[in-house]
Image: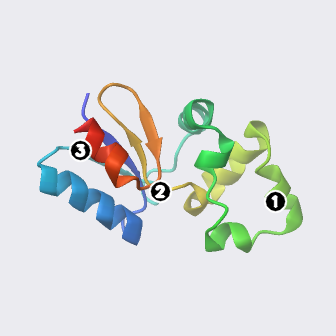
């Protein structure tokens, strides 16, 4: 299995992530949420492994523009998954699925390089 990087192509954090992999000569497969909507099973696996707080990007513009009812939907896995599918910009970027099956959310250069 090749490492998979999930996110949105034009995001600056994603560009930095791609650069880390490319500079290290590490191959990866990129999954763009805008071209391939994440399914409920994938999001459920992310949440189970990383926790809801790590998967939902509450610092981003998309989250901040939500009304209070939608924001409260991000407090449980069951209600967060459909919202994250609809508004994939709210998923923390990147989420990296490494060859060993481990997951990492967010750009943490030291942790990514440790996996190389």
Q: Is 37 positioned to the left or the right of 85 in the image?
A: left
What residue is pinned by disc 1?
A: 70
* Residue 89 coordinates in the image, percent (x, y): 56, 63
Label 1, label 3: how far apart the Cα atoms are: 34 Å
Q: Where 23 sits versus 28, above or below?
A: below
* Residue 85 coordinates in the image, percent (x, y): 62, 50
Q: Label 3 crowding class (10 Å Cα cut-off): few <14, some 14-19, many 20+?
A: some
- Please give the name of the residue rendered at 31% of the width and 58% of the height, measured from the top-left corner: 17
Q: Residue furthest right?
A: 69
Q: Where 79 sits versus 12, above or below?
A: above
Q: Mark 1 or mark 3, which has the lower sequence index?
A: 3
Q: Nearer the viewer, residue 39 or 69?
A: 69
Q: Which mark is residue 16?
A: none
Q: Label 2 crowding class (10 Å Cα cut-off): few <14, some 14-19, many 20+?
A: many
What residue is pinned by disc 3?
A: 28
Task: State the SS at label 3.
Answer: loop
Q: Mark 2 or mark 1, which has the lower sequence index?
A: 1
What residue is pinned by disc 2?
A: 93
Q: Mark 3 or mark 2, which has the lower sequence index?
A: 3
């Amino acid at each position: 299995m090749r490492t998979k990087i999930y996110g949105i192509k034009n995001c600056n954090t994603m560009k930095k992530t791609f650069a880390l992999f490319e500079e290290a000569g590490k191959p990866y497969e990129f999954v763009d949420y805008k071209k391939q909507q994440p399914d409920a099973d994938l999001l459920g696996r992310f949440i189970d492994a990383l926790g809801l707080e790590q998967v939902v990007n509450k610092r981003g513009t998309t989250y901040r523009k939500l009304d209070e009812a939608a924001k409260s939907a991000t407090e449980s896995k069951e209600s967060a998954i459909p919202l994250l599918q609809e508004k994939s910009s709210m998923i923390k970027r990147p989420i990296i699925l490494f060859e060993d099956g481990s997951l990492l959310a967010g750009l943490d250069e030291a942790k990514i390089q440790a996996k190389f």
